[in-house]
Amino acid sequence: MKAPGKISSLFIEIVCLLYMLLLVYAAMNKGLDFENFQVELAQSPLLSAFASWISWTVLIIEFGIAIFLLFRKTRIKALYAGFCLMSMFTAYIFIMLNYSSFLPCSCGGILEKMSWKQHLIFNLFFVALGATALLLDYRLRTKTDALRLTLASPLKLMISFAVCISAVLILFVSSEEIMQHKNPFIRRYPHHPVTLIKTVDLKYNSYYLAGHGNGKIYLGNPTAALSILMIDSRFRQHMIRASLDRGGFFFKSIKLTVTPPYFFILDGGSPAVFRGKIKDWKASLLTPPPPYFNIGFPIDSSTIVFRGISSKTSNNIIGLFRFGKKANAKTLPQLLEKQIDGVFDTDGMLHYSPEMKRIIYIYTYRNQYIAADENGVLNFRAHTIDTFSRAQIKVAYLKEKTERVMAAPGVNVNKASSVCGPLWLIE
């Protein structure tokens, strides 16, 4: 064999070795953290719908090519397969860089540390290495004339490269079609759902969101129940002190709610509800007093929706109370469904959406939420994507079954929630 032939053979051997090391390294990293690899693939806009079987296929192919690269008889065919695989990976990264709204990474180890552009260059380098090695092998093996030599092998590689790119494009188009119109119930997590613009140091961790409106947000604080922190759109802070027209109340659990132009101060343990206007922050007691409640929320200027304990069943119950001359209390026993004890199993979060004119209740220990109109008529019951349809809690009864406590910590299905217009946000 002449010197150029020896150099070409050595180059081919080195490329095969590099491909083998790369594929074994990549496959090992994927296999050692296979669950995370599948999750990352499921987040990919290109492969979401096919994540389950593609994850296994890629792993098997990478190990398979690496094994066949070990043997001289199968080395060139394995290198050709590796070239095709790297071409598909390169096409995948190119599409992700240019057409994807977010960039999940399903690689591991050192490869995961690369930026996407670095990864693209790295893959292109290996595609070029593979193509060069295959062309050199073709030159060494063929005995045809030079003109045929220069056309056949490059054409074969170009067709293979084009087929690989087309395959990835087909996966991309079909995956988005399935995700949008035939959703296989794969959860896709946006990597950057919120962009942080500016922060304000509140100095205390006891603040809660009391309301918003007219470009301002209002924060309440249980340690200073009548103090309201107002923050405008320029993040300027202003501390406001609300005043009550009556004193002498022994408040137990004051909650501030701001729904411009009104604000409300509610305490279900007293029970008492004060209402005022945000133009002067002076609140007057609404009469007559409502029933005792543990959660309350204003529906309009004279009506609240509340959750309390039923005097008949000792279970949680939702109700409506209207103040004024036409005062009226209305309980809605049909809304909350008892599963175990009627208190802990029906625990949840109560909201009201003025835009939709709906009362919304989201259970804490089960995957269910309900919606009712402003008169308490049930609209529908629905479920979140969690699987706990029955509350996973244990209840113990004390003092001859007159007092109940949680015997063990329950499984929180819905930890927190909020309502903003037509959107229901559940954690």
Image: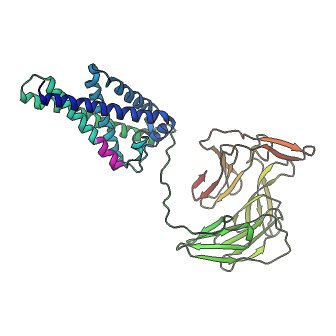
- Give me the residue at 22% from left, 32% from top: 11
Seen from the viewer's position, the closer of residues 74 and 306 is 74
- Residue 181 found in image quarter: top left
Query: 109 or 86, which lies in front?
Result: 109
Q: Is residue 172 above or below residue 8?
A: below
Residue 410 screen position, x and y as percent: 73, 43
Residue 119 shown in magenta: yes
Q: How many marks?
A: 0
Residue at the far front in the pictured view: 3
On the question of residue 183 being in view, the answer is: no
Image check: 332 left or right of 8?
right
Left or right side of 405 for 109: left
Task: Please name the residue shown 62% across and 77% down the image.
Answer: 238
- Counting from the top left corner in percent of width and height, residue 327 is at 80, 65
Which of 198 and 283 lies nearest the eye of the viewer? 198
User: In which quadrant of the rendered view does residue 226 lie?
Assistant: bottom right
Range shown magenta? 116-123
- Split into 4 quadrants, where in the image is the N terminus? top left
What is the x, y in percent for residue 225? 74, 70
Q: Nearer the viewer, residue 376 or 117?
A: 117
- Using residue 345 as the reference point, say whether residue 125 is left or right of it: left
The quadrant in which residue 77 appears is: top left
* Viewer can see residue 101: yes
- In the image, is residue 200 above or below residue 23? below
Which residue is located at x 12 percent, y 31 percent?
Answer: 151
